[in-house]
Image (cartoon, rainbow, N blue to C red):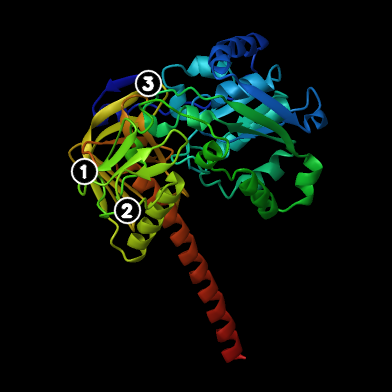
């Protein structure tokens, strides 16, 4: 899948008018039928099956919020199949509208910017539910999983449920990640895919719970480990390319601690610095070809990398600086290639300098709880996206080193540290106020 791009100067792009907002339009039955037909072949090839849990509680024409875990490109086809013929709108990233805005609106898509506060999105969801009497499909994780485990949920999701006041349905998939993990360059494996469609919460149950209680319920429901699922269910993946690109996620060698020199190719993951090599077995385990296997479970390795990043942040040694090709999105006509620059990420957040000094964008650690980053984005390359409501900057590293996964980990850990620091300041301020009042009394 590709995206429409165009080369323009920064001055030309920044002078373009902002994209006008349009309300969602009701999804026509003919588009629903067409989408189902187009989804059938891929799902048939995966021997797709699904089961319903408690769905008799949802009335036939009752709008609902559908929450779905996000693991591969087949997710939307699964939703189309299991929700048919119910009309529903799909919340998707705004760059998905580039070059096909009219079509995306007709099939029911609602654009949003990932990991940004989007008041307009909430209004569009309310409009779709109450005025158009249509359900809304939302991927609350907002981004594909890198390691087959859950990604962070927004803290605002509980408040959103209470605001929408509609039933909540959840779709959980099995096999979708194993069939097409993000790191593997869009190479499909022969894996059966299934799903569960569950009535999760009624409007009455939502009204009785606090946003924090709702967040806890969703956090529990969105906890998964797809490599563990593969292992426990003895799902065999025999393709000879199953480790291709695995270095994008497992970028740090646990043997010699070198970063950016892992090589995932065929069925092997090898450190080019120390020579340590692992085989990714047919059942999803890592096995050292010689010596000890430090991590035989991919999410454990990825979790260790997160811990290493957090230690760097705590000791103020984390620093990423890389030359990048810069693309920009200011409307839905094109993704504009505007030039080159330097992307820096430190304890203070992001800084992007580019286009001969014309671009100077900074982003604080508290800006977002995660990062829009991707592998092989629209077949262009590995990508890091930052930006605000005025413009989004898609940065493609020009050097090897597999920094995308580490940067996402750093953003998530930085956000946690920023929240902790903010809480400490508030607590300290409150303590001082009490002490001052006691002294003055």
- Gap in angstroms between the C-alphas marked 3 and 2: 37 Å
* Mark 3 closeness class: few <14, some 14–19, many ≥20 residues within 10 Å: some
- Disc number for residue 254: 2
Q: Residue at x 43, y 52 (%)?
A: 303
Q: Is 434 drawn above or below residue 335 in the view shown?
A: below
As drawn, the label of residue 418 is none
The tag earlier along the polypeptide, 1 or 3, is 3
Location of mark 1 (residue): 272
Residue 184 placed where, x, y %? 38, 30
Residue at 21% from the left image edge and 43% from the top image edge: 272
Q: Secondary structure at mark 2?
A: loop
In which quarter of the view is residue 36 placed?
A: top right
Quarter of the rendering containing residue 335: top left
Quarter of the image where one finds residue 343? top left
Rendered location of residue 355, percent (x, y): 21, 36
Residue underneath mark 3: 3
**CA distance separating discs 1 and 3:** 34 Å
Residue at screen point 67% across, 25% down: 50
> Horizontally, is 277 left or right of 38 in the view?
left
Mark in the foreground, 3 or 2: 2
Discs 1, 3 touching: Cβ within 8 Å: no
Q: Can you tell which of label 1 and label 3 is closer to the viewer?
A: 1
- Depth check: 242 or 55 in front? 242
Is 303 rendered above or below residue 32? below
Front-lying residue, 35 or 127: 35
**Mark before the other along the chain sequence, 3 or 2:** 3
């Amino acid at each position: 899948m590709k995206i429409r791009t165009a080369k323009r100067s920064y001055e030309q792009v920044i002078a373009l008018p902002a994209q006008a907002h349009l309300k969602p339009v009701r999804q026509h039955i003919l588009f629903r039928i067409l989408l189902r037909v187009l989804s059938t072949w891929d799902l048939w090839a995966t021997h797709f099956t699904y089961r319903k849990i408690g769905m008799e509680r949802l009335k036939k024409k009752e709008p609902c919020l559908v929450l779905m875990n996000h693991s591969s490109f087949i997710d939307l086809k699964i939703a189309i199949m299991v929700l048919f013929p119910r009309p529903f709108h799909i919340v998707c990233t705004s760059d998905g509208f580039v070059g096909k805005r009219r079509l995306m609106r007709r099939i029911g898509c609602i654009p949003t910017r990932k990991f940004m506060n989007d008041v307009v999105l909430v209004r569009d969801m309310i409009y779709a539910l109450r005025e158009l009497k249509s359900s809304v499909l939302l991927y609350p994780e907002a981004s594909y999983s890198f390691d087959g485990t859950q990604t962070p949920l927004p803290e605002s999701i509980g408040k959103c449920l209470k605001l929408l006041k509609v039933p909540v349905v959840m779709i959980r998939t099995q096999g979708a990640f194993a069939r097409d993990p993000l790191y593997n360059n869009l190479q499909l494996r022969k894996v059966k895919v299934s799903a569960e469609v569950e009535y999760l919460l009624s409007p009455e149950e939502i009204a009785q719970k606090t946003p924090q209680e709702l967040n806890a319920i969703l956090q529990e429901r969105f906890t998964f480990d797809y490599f563990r699922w593969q292992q426990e269910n003895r799902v065999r993946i025999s393709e000879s390319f199953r480790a291709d690109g695995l270095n994008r996620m497992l970028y740090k060698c646990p043997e010699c601690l070198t970063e950016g020199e892992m090589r995932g190719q065929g069925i092997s993951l090898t450190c080019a610095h120390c020579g340590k090599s692992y085989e990714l077995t047919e059942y999803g385990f890592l096995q050292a070809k010689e010596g000890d296997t430090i991590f035989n479970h991919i999410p454990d390795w990825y979790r260790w990398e997160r811990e290493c990043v957090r230690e760097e942040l705590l000791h103020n040694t984390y620093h990423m600086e890389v030359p990048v090709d810069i693309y920009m999105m200011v409307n839905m006509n094109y993704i504009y290639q505007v030039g080159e620059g330097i992307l820096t990420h430190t304890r203070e957040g992001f800084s992007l300098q580019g286009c001969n000094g014309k671009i100077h964008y900074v982003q604080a650690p508290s800006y977002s709880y995660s990062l829009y980053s991707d592998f092989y984005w629209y077949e262009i390359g590995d990508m890091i996206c930052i930006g605000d409501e005025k413009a989004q900057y898609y940065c493609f590293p020009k050097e090897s080193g597999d920094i995308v996964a580490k940067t996402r980990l750093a953003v998530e850990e930085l956000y946690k540290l920023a929240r902790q620091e903010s809480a400490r300041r508030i607590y300290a301020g409150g303590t001082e106020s009490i002490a001052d009042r006691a002294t003055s009394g």
